[in-house]
Amino acid sequence: MVKLRNLFKRKEYKKGYFIHETVNGFKLCRILNEYDKEQDAMDDLLKLLSHKVTQEDLLEVYSKKQSW
């Protein structure tokens, strides 16, 4: 039997962050996904900014990828 608390357990995603240096200082950035092609990353960025996908959508795809 499935325990009730397991039904509503929050999904755990891979977490990745990096520090980006700019002229004005440093920015802490969160990795939402990894891409082989720049165009694929740009497409997902546009979808994210136009609310066609959410950060959680991208993180779900990222969490299923083999990395490192």
Image (cartoon, rainbow, N blue to C red):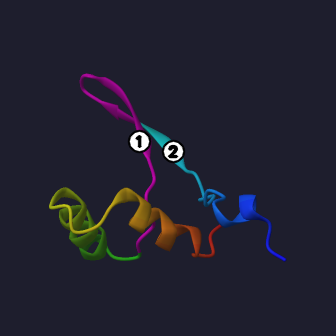
Q: Please give the range of residues in magenta.
A: 20-35
Question: Who comes first in sequence, dot 1 or dot 2?
Answer: 2
Percent position of residue 38, x then y: 29, 70
Is 29 included in the stretch rendered in magenta? Answer: yes
> Seen in the image, is 54 located left or right of residue 45?
right
Residue 64 quadrant: bottom right
Q: Nearer the viewer, residue 52 or 2?
A: 2
Picture residue at 43% right of the left edge, 60% below the top: 56
**Height in image: 28 above or below 52?**
above
Residue on which the image places disc 1:
29
**Hey, which residue is sitting farthest right in the picture?**
1
Q: Are marks 1 and 2 in contact (CB under 8 Å)?
A: yes
Badge 1 element: strand
Q: CA distance from mark 1 to mark 2?
A: 5 Å
Q: Is 8 in front, or is 42?
A: 8
The percent coordinates of residue 50 (x first, y second) are 15, 61
Residue located at (63% from left, 75% from top) = 66
To which residue does mark 2 refer?
17
Q: Quadrant of the C terminus?
A: bottom right
